Image (cartoon, rainbow, N blue to C red):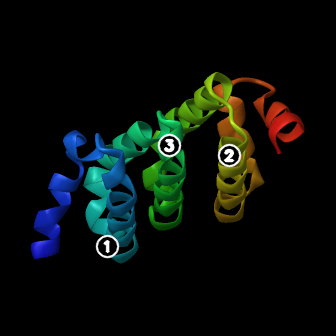
Amino acid sequence: DAYRALFQPLLAPANWDRKGNCPALVRLLQAYLKQGAAELLPHLQGILGCFQKLLALKSTEGNAFALLESVLVNVPMETLQPYLPQLFQLLMMRLQQNQTGRFCKLLVRFLCMFVVKHGPDGMVQCLEGVQAGMTNMIINQVW
């Protein structure tokens, strides 16, 4: 119960403003997701908000993908499905606006994990939902 009481304050935006806090907060959220993802499902939108905040900065993009990969592995697809269009939109916008070699590597790793967990058709559907032809662009220019 003490750990459950600690969870809600983790999602407070003020905690994520200091870059030095981010690696430890991400690891703590990963542990929560691994141990009790079912209990955290009502808070999934807040967790994804933390991901979005981390994704916005180059210095925390690695932490953003670590958190997103934990969500992908631990949250059932039927729960994650409504958030996928927005997640892929955010990833593609970040790719277009501020592409770095590191970001491309992290994105390809995430897409590989997505394919392993949910199949290639799921990935194609999500990418094409962002923009027609996005799958070919990602495979030819990023992968």
Mark sitting earlier along the chain (3/1): 1
Q: Which residue is mark 3?
A: 59
CA–CA distance in space, label 3 to label 1: 28 Å
Q: Is residue 104 above or below residue 38?
A: above
Q: Could you classify mark 2 by the number of other residues whose Cα lies within 10 Å: few (under 14), some (14-19), or many (20 or more)?
A: few
Task: Give coordinates of residue 61: x percent, y percent.
Answer: 52, 45
Measured as percent of width and height from the top left, residue 63 is found at 48, 53
- Residue type at mark 1 is Gly
Question: Can see residue 100?
Answer: yes
The answer to which of 140 and 59 lies nearer the viewer is 59
Real-space Cα distance between discs 2 and 1?
Answer: 31 Å
- Identify the secondary structure beneath mark 1: helix
As measured in the structure, the alpha-carbon distance from the residue carrying label 2 to the one carrying label 3 is 11 Å
Q: Nearer the viewer, residue 33 or 58?
A: 58
Circle 3 SS class: helix
User: Dot 3 surroundings within 10 Å: few (below 14), some, or many (20 or more)?
Assistant: few
Q: Which mark is residue 3?
A: none
Q: Nearer the viewer, residue 29 or 58?
A: 58
Q: Which residue is mark 1?
A: 36
Give 132 or 56, whichever is nearer the viewer: 56
Q: Amino acid at mark 2?
A: Arg
Q: Which residue is mark 2?
A: 102
* Left or right relative to 24: residue 99: right
| Residue at (10, 65) in percent of width and height | 5
Question: Which amino acid lies under the numbered mark 3 shown in the image of this protein?
Answer: Ser
Give the tally of numbered discs.
Answer: 3
**N-terminal label among 2 and 1:** 1
Residue at left offset 64%, top offset 27%: 130
